Image: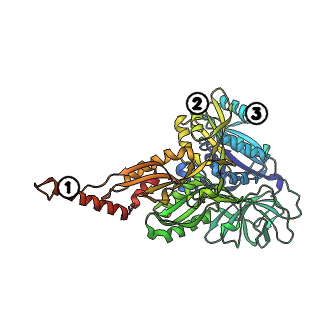
């Protein structure tokens, strides 16, 4: 199609502001989807996406629309995931577009992720069309939302389109605005083919299907192309687009979006943000490429040790559709054989574990999530460590650096004190506060990534009664006073419970773990000591009391010395048993402790 009749756009919004519902309406209105095929959350194909109302995997769609001026336009919607864990995917999707629809819920107003996504779009110089959605709700406040658009995002409020994706209000205005306000794609002027890889997935029959946006030249079957960052040369087998199912096209020209298949067997060979070019006359790479590195690590073990091979096969299948997920085998004395898995963030970790349980029917146990620490050794060497077991001896460590994040928390004015208390409890410091409007403030703070892993988001929601929202971006590594906390049961270290924590928090964490272990470890014939230790120093202790066997029951009457003799004999036996005996911690105890 003629470049002047192509529009590439994306939809950005905070979670649950109606992004997927609007996509459904656009597909229906342009006739891409017939009434018979129509269903809610059409682009969210995974059960998890539908249940949680979030987009995990982005889906591009090509639509044809006949505008009011009588001309036919090709509209390429490049859908993006909303969560911060996938922010690199969002940035690659946005760099494939010339414009973005910014959706704001009329009842909720501008939230933390709205701000973050608008900054991403502005960085890419996109034309932004604001859409105030859900205007049919009884508590929708359109004037307030327009004021927030101007005050917080510096976008003129009168340019916003009022819509309700659920009721189908304002859909035609949105389509016309896409044609009028979003510029057509321009060629980069490179000497040969330039196409950006913005996503990929694995198909059992075709191998890796690569999503591309052509910036210059044309892509067609039979062409030899080179992936500039991975250095692979491949032959294109098929090109096409999505509506939303894939369909074959003769070629993709400048400005068009679609997919290619080639003889690529593994998603690891395709790097997100890579540039495709003609293998014979290569062009330069498109800007913005980054390697994706996992930020959060956790051990995943099968509850039944016989399932190890089964788990290995299922993790490999999962990795086929998610190249950001990495795993390697590891073993633990307590939990047996398992895998050390790396994830982009907490939501990513939750999704992978949930998919293993549901789609592959695996019974798994996950260890406490940890982050990647940088260890500066006394000899000047730098090491990266994601597992407490590999932490070197204290004498060889000069300093430990931990990763930090810059968090943006938006909350109502009355909760600002509680929010600051929560941030300082999590070892963060508030860099500055910004008043957004008469009701809300935005706190920008620097926090250790380790501290926001578990319950930070839940705490924000409970403190602000659901009105707070949060977004974060990765900041730099900072030196910190981190120590390795070990749990000793009967004097022996249990590796599954050891973790790297800040010195100030180690005692509290040790007490909590010791108390939990005391509940789940079965009683023995002798006293069992549960201790939390930092190096050689014990910081917390609990004792599992001994089972008492009444050895004097057979002794009826007679002298007291007879009873004392039996008790002394029992005491000797217990002493000997304690020095030889080992405490076997049952699997259920591990599961109980690690669940909490």
Q: Is residue 479 above or below residue 417?
A: below
Query: Upstream in the sequence, badge 2 or badge 1?
Result: 2
* Residue 171 sits above or below residue 328 on the image: above
| Residue furthest left in the image | 557
Using the numbered discs, state the Cα–Cα distance from disc 3 to disc 1 in whole angstroms.
91 Å
Residue 145: image x %, image y %?
66, 32
Residue 462 appears anywhere in the view: yes
Residue 550 is left or right of residue 587, and the answer is left
Q: Tag 1, which secondary structure?
A: helix
Residue 264 in the image: x percent, y percent? Answer: 69, 71
Residue 383: x and y in percent read 67, 60
Where residue 242 sits, quadrant-wise, is bottom right
The one of 470 and 371 positioned closer to us in this rendering = 371
Residue 185 lies, with reference to residue 271, above or below; the image says above
Q: Are marks 3 and 1 in contact (CB under 8 Å)?
A: no
Secondary structure at numbered mark 2: helix
* Tag 1 residue: 564
Q: Earlier in the sequence, mark 3 or mark 2?
A: 3
- Residue bearing the label numbered 3: 156
The residue pinned by badge 2 equals: 417
Q: CA distance from mark 3 to mark 2?
A: 32 Å
Image quarter of residue 415 = top right
Q: Residue at x 50, y 60 (%)?
A: 495
Q: In this orientation, does residue 126 appear?
A: no
Q: Check contact, mark 2 vs mark 1: CB within 8 A.
A: no
Quarter of the rendering occupied by the N terminus: bottom right
Residue 72's spot in the image, x, y percent? 77, 52
Q: How many numbered discs, if any?
A: 3
> Which of the two residues, 482 or 27, is positioned nearer the viewer here?
482
């Amino acid at each position: 199609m003629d470049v002047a009749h192509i529009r590439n756009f994306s939809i950005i919004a905070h979670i649950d502001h109606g992004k997927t519902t609007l996509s459904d309406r656009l597909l229906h209105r342009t006739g891409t989807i017939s009434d018979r095929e129509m269903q809610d959350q059409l682009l969210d194909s995974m059960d998890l996406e539908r249940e949680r109302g979030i987009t995990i995997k982005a889906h591009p769609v090509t639509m044809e629309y006949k505008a009011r001026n009588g001309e036919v336009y090709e509209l390429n919607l490049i859908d993006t995931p909303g969560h911060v864990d996938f922010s690199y995917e969002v940035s690659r999707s946005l760099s494939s577009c010339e414009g973005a629809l910014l959706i704001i819920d009329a009842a909720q107003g501008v939230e933390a992720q709205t701000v973050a996504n608008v900054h991403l779009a502005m960085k890419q110089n996109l034309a932004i069309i604001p859409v105030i959605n859900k205007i049919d709700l009884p508590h929708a406040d359109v004037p307030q939302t327009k004021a927030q658009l101007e005050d917080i995002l510096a976008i003129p409020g009168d340019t916003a389109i009022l819509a309700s994706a659920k009721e189908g209000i304002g859909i035609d205005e949105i389509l016309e605005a896409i044609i009028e306000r979003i510029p057509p794609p321009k060629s980069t002027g490179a000497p040969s083919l330039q196409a950006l890889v913005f996503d990929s997935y694995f198909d059992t029959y075709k191998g890796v299907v690569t999503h591309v946006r052509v910036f210059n030249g044309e892509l067609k079957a039979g062409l030899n192309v080179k992936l500039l960052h991975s250095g692979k040369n491949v032959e294109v087998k098929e090109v096409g687009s999505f509506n939303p199912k894939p369909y074959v096209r003769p070629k993709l020209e400048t400005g068009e979006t679609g997919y290619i298949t080639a003889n690529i067997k593994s998603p690891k060979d395709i790097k997100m943000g890579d540039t495709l070019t003609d293998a014979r006359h290569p062009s330069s790479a498109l800007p913005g490429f980054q390697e994706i590195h996992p930020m959060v690590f956790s051990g995943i073990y099968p509850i039944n040790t016989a399932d190890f091979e089964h788990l290995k096969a299922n993790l490999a299948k999962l990795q086929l559709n998610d190249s950001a997920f990495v795993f390697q085998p590891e073993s633990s004395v307590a939990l047996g054989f398992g895998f050390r898995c790396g994830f982009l963030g907490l939501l990513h970790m939750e999704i992978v574990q949930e998919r293993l349980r549901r789609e592959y029917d695996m019974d798994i146990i996950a260890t406490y999530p940890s982050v990647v620490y940088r260890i500066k050794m006394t000899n000047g060497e730098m090491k990266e460590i994601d597992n407490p077991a590999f932490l070197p001896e204290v004498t060889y460590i000069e300093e430990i650096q931990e990763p930090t994040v810059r968090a943006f928390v938006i909350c109502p004015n009355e909760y600002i004190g509680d929010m600051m208390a929560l941030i300082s409890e999590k070892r963060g410091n508030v860099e500055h506060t910004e008043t957004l409007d008469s009701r809300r403030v935005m706190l920008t703070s620097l926090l250790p990534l380790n501290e926001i892993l578990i319950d930070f988001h839940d705490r924000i929601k409970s403190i602000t009664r659901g009105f707070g929202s949060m977004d974060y971006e990765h900041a730099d590594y900072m030196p910190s006073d981190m120590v390795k906390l070990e749990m000793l049961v009967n004097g022996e270290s249990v590796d599954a419970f050891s973790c790297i924590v800040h010195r100030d928090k180690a005692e509290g964490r040790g007490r909590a773990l010791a108390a939990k272990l005391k509940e789940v470890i079965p009683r023995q014939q002798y006293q069992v000591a549960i201790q939390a230790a930092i190096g050689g120093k014990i910081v917390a202790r609990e004792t599992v009391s001994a089972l008492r066997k009444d050895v004097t029951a057979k002794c009826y009457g007679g002298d007291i010395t007879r009873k004392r003799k039996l008790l002394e004999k029992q005491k000797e036996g217990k002493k000997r048993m304690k020095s030889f005996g080992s405490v076997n911690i049952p699997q259920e105890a591990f599961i109980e402790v690690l669940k909490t």
